[in-house]
Image: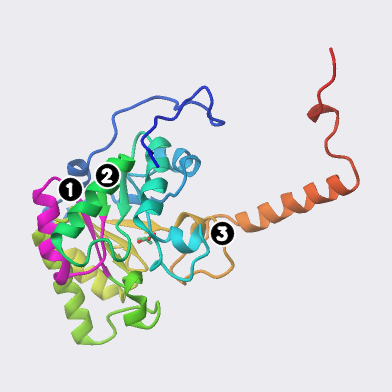
Amino acid sequence: MSTTFQLDTSTSRANPTPQPMKRLTVPALRKRKKDGATQQPLVVLTAYTARQAQLLDAHCDLLLVGDSLGQVVYGLPSTVPVTLEMMANHAAAVVRGSYHAVVAVDMPFGSYEASPAQAFESAAYLMKASGAAAVKLEGGAVMAETVRFLVERGIPVVGHVGLTPQAVNVLGGYGARGKSDAEADKIVADARALDEAGAFAIVVEGVLEPIAEAVTATVACPTIGIGASAKCDGQVLVTEDMLGMFERVPRFVKRYENLAETIAAAARQFAAEVRDRTFPGPDQTYHAD
Ligand code: KIV
């Protein structure tokens, strides 16, 4: 499917972009951290659709088209079955719906681990098909060569260490990582390897807080925490989680809304009005002039 259309503001249901502006760039985000300090933390949310992107864009530095869409949008049991085509299509929608934030797209399981060449082919496809400016991939030192290969060939990369959900079948679950000294040391070493390989930011997910602090103090690039620490250089949440769309969320999620209840209440009222024939009313029906 060809995906890089522009959003047509005359046919879109949303208001036109209020004020088209120059999009943030990867180097601008990378420069937010200087000499170990980040003055302005990076604000990151996931987005999977054009409308979601429109609503989040002005408030975010980075919109992440996460492979969490496998569970959130498609009802899959994990991120493992997510495909490149799914990521490309959702990323294209998010690019169409945004004008300010950098859009980064997750490389799905199986699309990059075999070799740097495989990763380049997959990442180039995602960027061409969607217009996204960067990719994210999971894994530490073992992916450093691939990160370097991509960056040297024009593909900005966000790393991802700690709890790496694509490895759920090896990890055995989604619990916090770094509970032994050896594992904690490995997470810090993994982040250092990605930083040295040229990642422009690193997601640190589901780790004991001192590990997130150690990673943030160790790497030159910004860290983006999720279930990590307020001391990270930025924070990310899955948007549907923070909007209260789900009953069960990890403990690191803060719900800023309760949209599940709001949507259920609206559907309940619609159903009642259809059944008692009060919808549609005069305002929602056409009549000859
Ligand atoms: O897939 C995703 O949404 C992610 C974020 C939660 C970091 O990787």
Residue stretch rendered in magenta on the structure? 136-161
Residue ID at (33%, 81%): 171
Q: How is the image coloured?
A: rainbow
Residue 208 picture location, percent across and down? 31, 76
Asked if the stretch drawn in magenta spans residue 223, the answer is: no
- Asked where in the image residue 4 lies, by quadrant, the reply is top left
Q: Which amino acid does label 3 sit on?
A: Gly
Image quadrant of ligand 1? Answer: bottom left
Secondary structure, mark 3, is loop
Lower sequence index among marks 1 and 3: 1
Secondary structure, mark 2, is helix
Is residue 26 placed above or below 225 in the rendered structure? above
Label placed on residue 244: 3
Circles 1 and 2 in contact, beta carbons < 8 Å? yes
Residue ID for mark 1: 155
- Describe residue 226's horizontal placement relative to residue 255 as left or right: left
Q: Nearer the viewer, mark 2 or mark 3?
A: 2
Residue 245 appears in the rendering: yes
Q: Which amino acid does label 1 sit on?
A: Ile
Q: Which amino acid does label 2 sit on?
A: Met
Residue ID at (28%, 29%): 22
Residue 219 appears in the rendering: no
Lower sequence index among marks 1 and 2: 2
Residue 114 picture location, percent across and down? 19, 67
Secondary structure, mark 1, is loop
Residue ID for mark 2: 127
